[in-house]
Amino acid sequence: MHILHTLRFSKSANAMRDLPPDEGAEVAFAGRSNAGKSSALNALAAHKGLARVSKTPGRTQLINIFALDDGRSLVDLPGYGYAKVPIGVRDHWRGLVDSYLKHRQALKGIVLIVDSRHPLKEFDRQMLAYAEAIGLPCHVLLTKSDKLSRSEAARTLAHTRAEIGAEAGSRVSVQLFSATAKVGLDEAREVVMRWLGPAAA
């Protein structure tokens, strides 16, 4: 069993002051509200009930922290771009996420969840540009790849890699992923664990 299986829910934060102490290592998961972020987290942890999966996009309304062990965590950021919520609430999310990405010293990288059937929307490009601007590595999971034929998946991967390479430089990587068909789990876990590094002493 992979070590990510030991992930457990730690806490939710509605403001920066609600977050755990800014130490250790964190990897943040970001993406559009309907791209399969919670399903990807659950698949990586081999734990169906870790992150709440909802048929209603936008249900992740807080920053949710999942602790691996002393000093290492995965962070589920509020989904963006789709959620049918009041503008004031959406603006709060955006401000919270911006503050987290800009100021969180423990943050080591961003996993960007992108639906492989609708790759690289404007919000995704903004997140990639933002990560590049603040010097954070970003790994793109092209989710729901089981919904594509093998040739469609290969074309989508090649096209996305070409577009990302032109836009965001060498700090960005991309892969095919499917939580349902368990495609790309080992590759994604390897990236996450490399960013998290060894457990704190």
Image: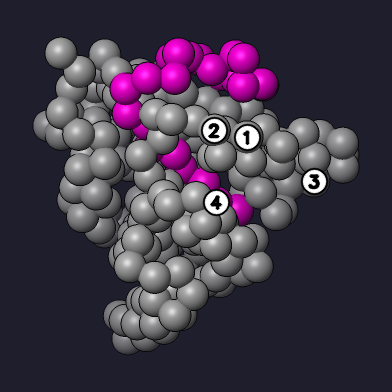
Question: What amino acid type should be assigned to the residue bearing mark 4?
Answer: Gly
Residue 72 visible somewhere in the drawing: yes
Q: Residue at x 26, y 59 (%)?
A: 183
For mark 2, give the secondary structure.
Answer: helix
For mark 3, give the secondary structure.
Answer: loop
Q: Which residue is mark 3?
A: 84
Classify 68 as above or below 45. above
Quadrant in the rendering for residue 125: bottom right
CB-based contact (under 8 Å), mark 3 and mark 2: no
Mark 1–mark 4 distance (CA, rounded to whole Å): 16 Å
Mark 4–mark 3 distance (CA, rounded to whole Å): 15 Å
For mark 4, give the secondary structure.
Answer: strand
CB-based contact (under 8 Å), mark 2 and mark 4: no
Q: Does the magenta-highlighted stretch encompass residue 132?
A: no
Residue 141 visible somewhere in the drawing: no
In the rendered structure, the answer to whether residue 102 lies left or right of residue 23 reads: right
Mark 3–mark 2 distance (CA, rounded to whole Å): 28 Å
Q: Which residue is mark 1?
A: 99
> Which disc number belongs to residue 31?
4
Disc nearer the start of the sequence (2/4): 4
Q: Which residue is mark 2?
A: 103
